[in-house]
Image (tube, grey):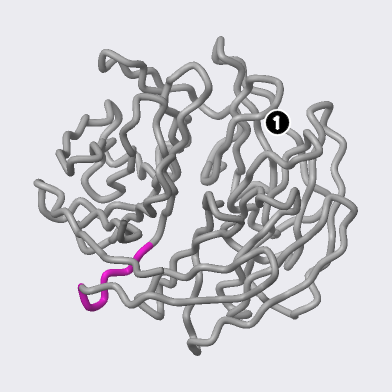
């Protein structure tokens, strides 16, 4: 199969696209961490942006929930943001000061679950805006990205703790050691095989952990690729960004890996999402939104 790239320039300069998510409206949503905006791009490449109410909020990760609302973390402002169709924003203060909320996902309970990077907690916010926090067993573990697993629990990476974490909707926490020392796990996604797949930014590997805690790792061919985010595809595969390698990677559930060089040099790809038709969308910090499509 042959894949081709398209790139779309974000209208406002120095926007710094970071997070990426598929919306329920058929569009792709992204955060502009430097521009302090929430962005939207259609399948036709039309881009619109919405200014986040709190200045210099540090908008990072983004997710669209099952109701069509778009949620995002405000790393610097210590808030969880919400955008409702029609353009209405709401922001919710995280109770713990300087928590640095980072990754987020929708849970099976309908709440939005998020990580608190600075304070070693996992939080959740209900549709009504009520926030609950759960302390992790170890300090300075830097919880990063989080996703819902096939077992109904929430799974997350511990970037400095070198572990993969699991929390039930009742708040019971388990942690699993990654075999590679100081691997620096970041992105994590629920794979098409029911396992959790994660990237190791320092270990230069893609990891797979079953819901029973068994881990296997696959080395990325490009040295110092610095993989960042990962998302499930539609063909029994997963896609990931290589911040250092300036590539988009693909790995099958059998572990076969392919890499594709991004046309723009030093694009610094971060967030990634796969649309229903199989197109791979990703945020480039160089003020572009990238797209990788399979030729028909």
- Say which residue appears at 39% left-offset and 54% top-offset: 280
Q: Quadrant of the C terminus?
A: bottom left
Range covered by the magenta-colored residues: 264-269
Q: Looking at the picture, tell me which residue is in the foreground, 263 or 171.
A: 263
Q: Residue at x 58, y 36 (%)?
A: 105
Quadrant of res 104:
top right
- Residue 11 in percent (x, y) is at 9, 46
Check the image and name the residue furthest to the front: 296
Provide residue 39's location: percent of width, then percent of height: 25, 38
The residue under the point 76% across, 63% down is 163
Q: Is residue 45 magenta?
A: no
Query: Is 161 on the left or on the right of 43, as rendered?
Result: right
Q: Is residue 102 left or right of residue 162?
A: left
Instruction: Look at the numbered disc 1 and give the secondary structure of its residue.
Output: strand
Tell me which secondary structure the magenta stretch mostly adopts.
loop
Q: Considering depth in this image, is 146 or 162 the residue closer to the camera?
A: 146
Query: Among all residues in the image, which is located at the extreme right?
Result: 212
User: Could you tell whether 195 is left or right of 100 in the image?
Assistant: right
To which residue does mark 1 refer? 133
Q: Residues within 10 Å of mark 1 (few under 14, many from 20)?
A: some
Q: Does 15 appear above or below 70?
A: below
Please state the horizontal and vertical placement of residue 195, each as a whole percent of the image: 75, 53
Nearer to me, 61 or 9: 9
Quadrant of the image occupied by residue 7: bottom left
Q: Position of residue 157 (x, y in %)?
A: 67, 56
Q: Quadrant of the N terminus?
A: bottom left
């Amino acid at each position: 199969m042959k894949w081709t790239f398209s790139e779309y320039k974000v209208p406002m300069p120095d926007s710094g696209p970071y997070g990426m998510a598929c919306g329920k409206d058929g569009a792709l949503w992204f955060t502009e961490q430097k521009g302090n905006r929430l962005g939207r791009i259609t399948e036709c490449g039309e881009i619109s942006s919405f200014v986040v109410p709190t200045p210099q909020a540090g908008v990072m990760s983004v997710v669209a929930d099952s109701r069509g609302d778009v949620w995002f973390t405000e790393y610097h402002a210590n808030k969880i943001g919400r955008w409702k169709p029609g353009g209405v924003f709401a922001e919710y203060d995280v109770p713990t000061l300087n928590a640095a909320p980072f990754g987020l996902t929708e849970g099976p309970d309908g709440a939005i679950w998020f990580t608190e990077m600075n304070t070693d907690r996992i939080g959740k916010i209900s549709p009504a805006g009520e926030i609950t926090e759960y302390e992790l067993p170890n300090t300075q573990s830097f919880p990063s990205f989080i996703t819902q697993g096939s077992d109904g629990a929430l799974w997350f990476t511990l970037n400095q703790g070198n572990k993969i974490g699991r929390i039930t909707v009742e708040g019971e926490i388990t942690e699993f050691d990654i075999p590679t020392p100081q691997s620096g796990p970041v992105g994590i996604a629920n794979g098409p095989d029911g396992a959790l797949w994660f990237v190791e930014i320092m270990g230069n590997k893609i990891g797979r952990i079953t819901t029973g805690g068994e881990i296997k790792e696959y080395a990325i061919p490009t040295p110092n690729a610095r993989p960042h985010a990962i998302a499930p595809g539609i063909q029994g595969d997963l896609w990931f960004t290589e911040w250092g390698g300036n590539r988009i990677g693909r790995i099958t559930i059998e572990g076969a890996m392919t890499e594709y060089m991004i046309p723009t040099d030093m694009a610094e790809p971060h967030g990634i999402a796969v649309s229903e038709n199989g197109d791979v969308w990703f945020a480039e910090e160089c003020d572009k939104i990238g797209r990788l499509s399979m030729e028909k």
